[in-house]
Amino acid sequence: PKAKSLSDLLGIEGTAASSYWAAWTAIEIKWRKSARYPIQDDWLRFSSRSSLFEAHKMANVRATHPVNAMLNYAYAILLSEARLKAIADGFDPQIGIVHFRDRGRRGGERPSFALDVMEPSRPVVDRAVLKLIEEETFSGADFQLQLDGVCRLNPELARQVASAALKHVQLVRKV
């Protein structure tokens, strides 16, 4: 497909992203059985980059699945690195090229340029999370399920995800 506008390009990106995340549904997540920390049935497989709750379908920032929680945490680290890189190179991290359209989802300014800078490195961070999923056997204790259904990483797993992501964000520093 040939894009004639930014809107066309974003449409192509959306179609590609849909196929990309659909491929993730084949990934096996290994879980340690525990009566004390049971695993929700919908955590046994990765189903989508979106929330498992209908009300949050487009809000993947509010992860309801452990894989999305790990991805969000790793992306936050990548975004921090991209923001620091933009500032160090004399750019305003708020003034983006592609991610320019709106203010932040939760109010405040959105680091649009930093989001643009981090975009090419997302697959590298995805690879770090995939490697962690492949190598680890998780437990329900690795995640904290909040009252609103949002899934958070426990501190030890957060350290593992941070370490894995930081090993792979060197690309951002070279952009």
Image (cartoon, rainbow, N blue to C red):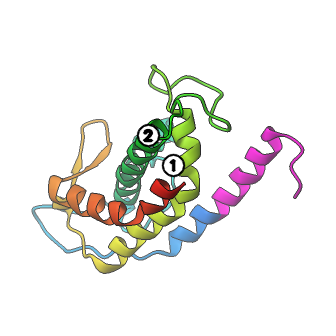
Type of the residue with mark 1? Ser
Q: Main secondary structure of the magenta part?
A: helix
Please say whether residue 58 is visible from this viewpoint. no
**Which one is earlier in the sequence, the residue at label 1 or at label 2?**
1
Q: Is residue 159 magenta?
A: no
Residue 114 placed where, x, y %? 51, 40
Image disc number at residue 145: none
| Residue displayed at 85% across by 40% down | 5
Q: Residues within 10 Å of mark 2 (few under 14, many from 20)?
A: few
Q: Nearer the viewer, mark 1 or mark 2?
A: 2
Seen in the picture, residue 170 relative to 148 is either above or below; the reply is below
The spot of residue 105 in percent (x, y) is 50, 27
- The residue under the point 18% across, 73% down is 33
Which of the pair 121/25 is nearer the observer? Answer: 121
Q: Nearer the viewer, residue 169 or 7?
A: 169
Task: Judge whether 141 appears above or below 3 on screen.
Answer: below
Q: What segment carries the magenta color?
A: 1-19
Q: 1 or 42, which is in the foreground?
A: 1
Name the mark on residue 50.
1
The residue that appears at 57% across and 51% down in the rendered structure is 119
Residue flagged by tag 2: what amino acid is it? Ala
Q: Is residue 128 above or below residue 172?
A: below
Secondary structure found at label 1? loop
The answer to which quarter of the image holds residue 29 is bottom left
Looking at the rendering, which quadrant does residue 65 occupy? bottom left
User: Which secondary structure, mark 2?
Assistant: helix
- The x and y percentages for residue 170 are 42, 62
Q: Which residue is mark 2?
A: 88
- Give left or right: position of 92 versus 10: left
Give the side of residue 43 with respect to residue 115, left or right: left
Residue 10 lies in the magenta-colored region: yes
Q: In percent of the image, x 24 and y 63: which residue is there? A: 160
